[in-house]
Image (cartoon, helix red, strand yellow):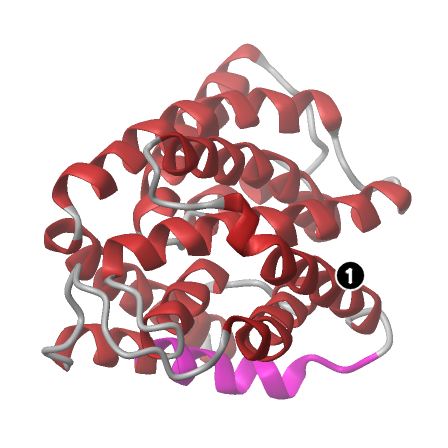
């Protein structure tokens, strides 16, 4: 199927990006909607992934901007984690071109199911901060770098992995963890986008159109995080994690 950007396809992809941006700002997993939609529109897989990174940058940027303005995140405290996440994503994007990702494809659904189980059954996941396990520097060179590497290498569920790391290792409450996760996810998105752009895989007109939809959805979703906190984040994280796992398992065995 060849790609042709008609008015109808543009409107559908814009709306899909808006919904995905709303979901992504709260729980991650918006790529479950946007990547299949881009491939349905006729984009080859590599081009769909590259264009998806462009529109995802919009959602993560505007969600991050909202969280910073609301005082949920201090950029001065995130300089090192952002740099490590960026570097990790760059390394992952390079590595994926050299390494077979089939083993990760098998393991990933079960890792994401683990996220769903943790948020579903752990009574400790609230909006209250608790004991920090790792120092900020240790967190940067382990969780931020490692998850950034994963995002560049593979990608699905990155926002959920970052949020889980902030809850378990940094001792953040769920709303605060979600806000910080979005900034690190923006860093990894930008890093991956740069490498995709160098490869000439991005359809800029379509990506920028969807970026606008992402911006609208992400801003609305960010407001829900601030006002509703764990009441909306926890069930949506569990739901999106289950959906991601089901989709990945279906792709393996269908």
Span of residues in magenta: 99-113
Q: Name the spot of residue 55 as percent of width and height, x first.
A: 58, 34
Which residue is at the far top? 7
Q: Toward the viewer: 167 or 94?
A: 167
Q: Name the spot of residue 139 as percent of width and height, x first.
A: 53, 75
112 on left or right of 60 = left
Q: Which image quarter: residue 109?
A: bottom left
Image point (40%, 25%), residue name: 15
Looking at the rendered structure, the secondary structure element under dot 1 is helix
- Reply yes or no: does residue 107 show up in magenta: yes
Q: Which image quarter: residue 169?
A: bottom left
Q: Tag 1: Cα neighbours inside 10 Å, few (<14), some, or many (≥20)?
A: many
Vertical arrangement, residue 20 with respect to residue 179, above or below: above
Judged by its main secondary structure, the magenta piece is: helix
20 on left or right of 116 = right
- Residue 44 appears anywhere in the view: no
Instruction: Name the residue that disc number 1 marks.
Output: 90
Q: Name the spot of residue 67 as percent of width and height, x first.
A: 38, 38
Q: Name the spot of residue 82 as percent of width and height, x first.
A: 62, 56
Image point (58%, 20%), residue name: 209
């Amino acid at each position: 199927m060849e790609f042709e950007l008609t008015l109808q396809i543009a409107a559908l992809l814009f709306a899909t990006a808006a919904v995905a941006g709303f979901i992504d700002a709260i729980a991650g997993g918006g790529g479950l909607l946007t990547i299949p939609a881009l491939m349905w529109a006729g984009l080859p897989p590599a081009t769909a992934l590259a264009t998806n990174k462009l529109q995802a940058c919009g959602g993560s940027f505007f969600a991050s901007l909202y969280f910073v303005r609301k005082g949920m995140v201090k950029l001065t405290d995130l300089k090192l984690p952002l740099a490590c996440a960026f570097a990790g994503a760059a390394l992952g994007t390079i590595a994926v071109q050299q390494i077979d990702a089939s083993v990760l494809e098998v393991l990933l659904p079960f890792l994401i199911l683990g996220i769903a189980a943790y948020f579903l059954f752990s009574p400790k996941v609230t909006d209250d901060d608790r004991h920090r396990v790792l120092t900020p520097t240790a967190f940067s060179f382990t969780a931020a770098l490692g998850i950034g590497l994963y995002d560049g290498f593979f990608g699905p569920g990155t926002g959920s992995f970052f949020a889980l790391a902030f809850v378990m290792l940094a001792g953040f409450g769920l709303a605060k963890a979600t806000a910080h996760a979005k900034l690190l996810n923006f860093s990894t998105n930008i890093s991956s986008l740069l490498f995709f752009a160098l490869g000439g895989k991005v359809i800029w007109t379509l990506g920028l159109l969807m970026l606008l939809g992402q911006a609208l959805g992400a801003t609305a979703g960010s407001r829900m995080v601030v006002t509703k906190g764990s009441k909306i984040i926890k069930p949506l994280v569990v739901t999106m994690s289950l959906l991601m796992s089901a989709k990945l398992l279906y792709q393996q065995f269908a």
